[in-house]
Amino acid sequence: MTTELIPVAGGSHIWAEKAGDGPPLVLLHGSVHDSRLWNGVFAVLARHHTAVRYDARGHGCSTLATAPFRYEDDLLAVLDRFGLQTAGLVGLSMGGEVALDFTLEHPERVRSLTLIAASASGHEWPQSPEMDAYVAAHRGSDGCRIAELELTLWASLGDRAPGFEVIEPMVRENAEAGASAEKGHALDPAEGAVDRLDRIEVPTMVVIGDHDHPEIGVIAGRLADGIPGARLEVVADADHYLPLRAPGRLLELLLAADGFVDRRGGRSDR
């Protein structure tokens, strides 16, 4: 197991961890999260894969952005630093959005795609008082309010469900820094992904928890219907924090997907 601080554009550094050997698998977390999101699955995945997880800029142990940047460029820097010519991408929420946009931009670098509770660039969210408050908290970099709304809206199964002992401190520690990292720095893709889903040619699995936000379910259906050959998996007893709520079931899906990728002819070189 190795950890590195990877230099990226603008003088920032990305903290990344690599473990194991086998077909590379890179894990991308969502906003207000960090690589702890994958605590329940990382060690087991490393028995079968070269597993990589990293903290996005301004999250966890990575440094804040000092200039406008693209999350997709940071992912490319991580792949290049570890010498991964191709990799399977596993992204949750914002991490799923980044993985999807990256696949459209760099299809030759992606072996497979797993989109967990993913957002998607170009998808227009309907207005609601709860989501309006959430967006306003992010725009105002109100860390306490972001954390409060995050735990209410997205960790809907509450503190009695598995994983909350990781979820709560991770959210509270990243809320203010994560909002600062995104505000005025993260650049949106020039073209949304939702209108280009038919261009995705790698084996794709869309995963959602049965207790996630309803609009995430809408996006999941849109991704599963629009990406050729994609399959949709619904995980019981899981909200937006699916890797911590139901790690065992997610591991089953990810490890079983290896055979699915091979049958589809996914790239296996490293």
Image: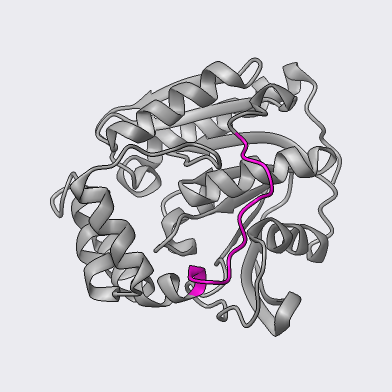
> In the figure, 158 relative to 34: above or below?
above
x and y percent of residue 121 in the render? 55, 42
Magenta span has 182?
Answer: yes
State the residue in front, 245 or 128: 128
In the figure, is residue 30 to the left or right of 262?
left
Principal SS element in the magenta part? loop
In magenta, the rendered stretch is: 181-193
Q: Quadrant of residue 10?
A: bottom right
In the image, what residue occupies the spot 57% across and 35% down?
114
x and y percent of residue 235 in the render? 35, 28
Magenta span has 99?
Answer: no
In the image, what residue occupies the spot 16% across and 50% down?
158
> In the figure, 194 relative to 45: above or below?
above
Quarter of the figure with the N terminus: bottom right
Q: Is residue 2 visible?
A: yes
Q: Quadrant of residue 205?
A: top right
Q: Quadrant of residue 166?
A: bottom left
In the figure, is residue 265 to the left or right of 149?
right
x and y percent of residue 72 in the render? 69, 55
> In the figure, 67 relative to 239: above or below?
below
